[in-house]
Every structure is written in C-alpha cells, then in structure tokens.
Image: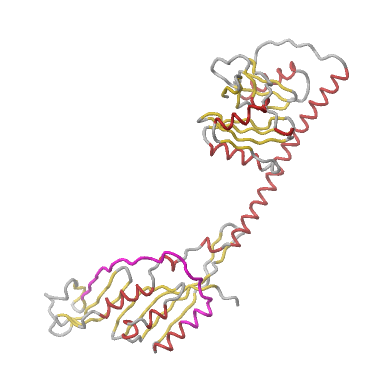
C-alpha cells in the first residue's frame, strides 16, 4: 500500500478488497480480521457498504487517510470505470469499479505492468472506455473533482463500538443491499471467467484468420536477400571469361563463380607443366589437379520489392523464351510451396514456390553482353553460380513465382 496527497487530503492505494455478505461494520471488521489472519499479516482496514479493504503499512499512518478507490465517483454516474494513472514517478495505479464495488485497486512500478493488468481487466469491461494519464499532474487533475472522501483506514485490531442501526425496515434494506452486492460480486467473478474463456477463444480464432490471410509473413523472401541478377551476372561473366585457358602448361579445367562470394578455379596438369610453379595462388590437390580460390567483391542486395512476382506459368514461359532466343539448353524443376505449422490446428502454406533452373551450352557472347542476364532479370530471379567447364558455360539459379491456381 502507498499513500498520496491530492487536494490537501491523504489517500491510500493498493488495498485488497473483499465483498461482505452483509451485516454491520462490527461484523465486517470481524470478517476482515479472520481474512487477514488466514492470508497475510495485514494491519489496516477500510470499511464501506458491501466491502472491506485490507492493507499493510509499515510507516506511521497519517490521520484521516481515505481509500482513493472507494472515494472515487466515476464521471456521469457511470456504473463501471477503468482507469490507469501515474500518481508519482514510479507509482502507477489501476482502478476498476463495477456498480459501486471496487474490483481492482493495484499499484505497480512501471507503465508496462499497469497496462498489462488493465488490459486483462478490460477484457471483461469491453464497453468501458479506459481512462489513461501518464503524468502525475494530469492524473491528479483528473481525479481531484471526482473525489468524495470515503472509507478511512483504521488499525485492524482497534476495538470499535458502533450503535446498531435502528428500525426493522432500515435493517432489511441494508441486508438486501449487502447480499445484493455480494451476489453481484459473485456474478462478476463468474462473468469474468466465462468472458475470459470466450474472449481467449475469439482471440485465437481472430489470430488464426489473420495468419491465414497473410501467409507471406511466415516465410523468407530469399530473392530480396540476393544481389540484382544483372550485377551478379556481370561480375561472374567478367571473372570467368577473363581467365586464361592455360598458365605454365596448367590447363583451365573448371571455373565456378558465386556472385559476391568467390571464384574457384580448377587447373589440370598437362605434359610438361611445372609442379614448382603452378598458377599463382593455386594449391596442389593431386599430381593432376591444382585448386585456386579468389575472393570477389561483395554485391549490394536488393533494397526493396519493386515489382510483384510472376505467376508460375508466366515464369516458366519466360525461361523457355530465353532458351529459344539465346540458343541454349534449360533444365527447370519446381519445388512444392513451403509449409509452416504454427500449432496443431493451423498450417500455413507459402504463397510462392521456387523454381530451380540450369542453363547450359550458353554462348559466351550472350553471357558477356546484356542479352542473357537482361532477359533473366525478372522479379524473384536470382543467380547462384556461373560455371565454365570443358568449354561449356552453365548458369544455375532460382526463380520464385506465385503458386499455380491449378
């Protein structure tokens, strides 16, 4: 429990409120003492119609300290109220009231904790607008005109003598009010549990619909993590086709370019080739082969998705058209769309699928010019490697396309 000054009065926040099944304040005080001895070592109590609040305070209690929650009169005579207030720099207060009963009177040290508690309570007060003030000045300015001091805090074990209420009718009305409040509190708890279950189910279903409506959020857009295919093709074409066919009688056997990564060159030994002087940078693997690896400058990845992916049928036709125009050979295989299982009931399917292509028998003039890679530069296409092997130029890569409707 904490105390705070508002308009020259001292108020307490952070009480544990319990419903009273009826009776006068003497009965309520007895119930409060029994509750305190069973759960916690509370030393203060605040009594009000239909409820009592317990608190623990280790300091000297200022005289005439009232419960802030019990003293609050919601504006416009609202039957329900939910508020989150920053009363001091590190003191956040969450207050919930339903039909005059305090159902929430908690204090926290951070805004995150307070908003989380209010969010949990707001699930059962969906028609109630939350009042929120994140500065002490704004919070106290809002509360000040709504306060009517009630429920002063007293020592829990102080002996109090009170005169019994007079008149049978007054007693009946009081008991009816107390029992009605107790019933209302029980109904609120039942409603709270039922509402929690229903809202959890509704939230789960809404989340599932949201997941199914946006499957692209659950899969990597690999093509956006790769360099532009024109820049990648230009780098590899210049690196591979710029190699000599032989060095010191070592014959170029194979060159493999990974754009933005490295160029691996395999040299084959021919008669008279020097083992002492293999090609610069190459290491002997066997008497017949030397291997050289050259790093390539990094390439910038695509910064954004400027155009939508092609449909699978259109992407396939585009690759066939390139094959026909360039005069090469094509191998193309489509992987099934990826799937991601979120939970036992929900499995998401990617809205795109990957095509794995390989062009072979490519003419050098097409690779060095802009014809081939310019035609291949399509949304979702990326270059994995360019290889020269036994006078054959081979280009491997991926093309991502939207899933076929068939």
User: Colour scheme in the image?
Assistant: secondary structure
State left or right for residue 38 relative to residue 367: right
The quarter of the displayed image where residue 9 is located? top right
The answer to if 44 sits in the magenta stretch is: no
The quarter of the displayed image where residue 101 is located? top right
Q: Position of residue 270 (x, y in %)?
A: 17, 84
Write down the region rendered in magenta. Answer: 290-318
State left or right for residue 198 relative to residue 283: right
Q: Position of residue 180 (x, y in %)?
A: 80, 30
The answer to if 292 sits in the magenta stretch is: yes
Residue closest to the eye, 377 or 357: 377
Question: Residue placed at 20% from the left, 82% from the top?
Answer: 251
Q: Position of residue 355 (x, y in %)?
A: 47, 75
Quadrant for the N terminus, please.
Answer: top right
Question: Residue placed at 39% from the left, 68% from the top?
Answer: 226
State left or right for residue 326 relative to residue 69: left
């Amino acid at each position: 429990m904490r105390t705070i000054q508002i308009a020259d009065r001292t108020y307490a926040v952070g009480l544990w409120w319990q419903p009273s099944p009826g009776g006068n304040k003497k009965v309520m005080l007895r119930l409060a003492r029994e509750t305190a001895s069973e759960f916690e070592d509370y030393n203060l109590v605040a009594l009000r119609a239909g409820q009592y609040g317990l608190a623990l305070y280790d300091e000297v209690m200022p005289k005439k300290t009232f419960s802030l929650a019990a003293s609050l009169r919601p504006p416009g005579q609202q039957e329900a109220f939910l508020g989150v207030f920053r009363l001091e720099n590190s003191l956040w207060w969450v207050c919930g009231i339903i039909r005059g009963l305090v159902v929430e009177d908690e204090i926290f040290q951070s805004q995150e904790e307070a908003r989380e508690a209010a969010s949990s309570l707001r699930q059962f007060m969906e028609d109630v607008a939350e009042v929120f003030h994140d500065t002490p000045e704004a919070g106290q300015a809002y509360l000040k005109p709504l306060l009517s001091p009630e429920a002063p805090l007293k020592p829990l074990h102080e002996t109090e003598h009170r005169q019994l209420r007079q008149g049978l009718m007054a007693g009946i009305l009081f008991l009816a009010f107390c029992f009605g409040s107790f019933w209302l509190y029980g109904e609120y708890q039942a409603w709270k549990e039922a509402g929690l279950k229903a809202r959890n189910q509704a939230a789960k279903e809404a989340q599932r619909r949201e997941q199914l409506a946006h499957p692209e959020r659950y899969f990597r857009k690999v093509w956006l993590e790769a360099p532009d295919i024109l820049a990648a093709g230009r780098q590899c074409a210049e690196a591979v086709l710029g190699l000599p066919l032989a060095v010191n009688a070592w014959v170029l056997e194979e060159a493999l370019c990974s754009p933005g990564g490295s160029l691996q060159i395999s040299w084959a030994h021919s008669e008279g080739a020097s083992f002492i002087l293999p090609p610069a940078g190459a290491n002997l693997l066997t008497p017949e082969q030397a291997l050289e690896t050259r790093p390539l400058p990094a390439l910038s990845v695509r910064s954004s998705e400027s155009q939508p992916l092609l449909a699978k049928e259109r992407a396939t036709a585009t690759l066939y058209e390139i094959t026909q125009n360039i005069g090469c050979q094509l191998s193309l295989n489509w992987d099934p769309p990826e799937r991601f299982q979120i939970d036992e009931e929900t499995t998401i399917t990617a809205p795109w699928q990957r095509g794995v292509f390989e062009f072979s028998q490519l003419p050098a003039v097409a690779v060095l010019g802009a014809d081939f890679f310019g035609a291949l530069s399509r949304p979702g296409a990326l270059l994995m490697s360019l290889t020269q092997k036994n006078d054959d130029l081979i280009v491997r890569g991926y093309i991502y396309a939207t899933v076929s409707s068939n």
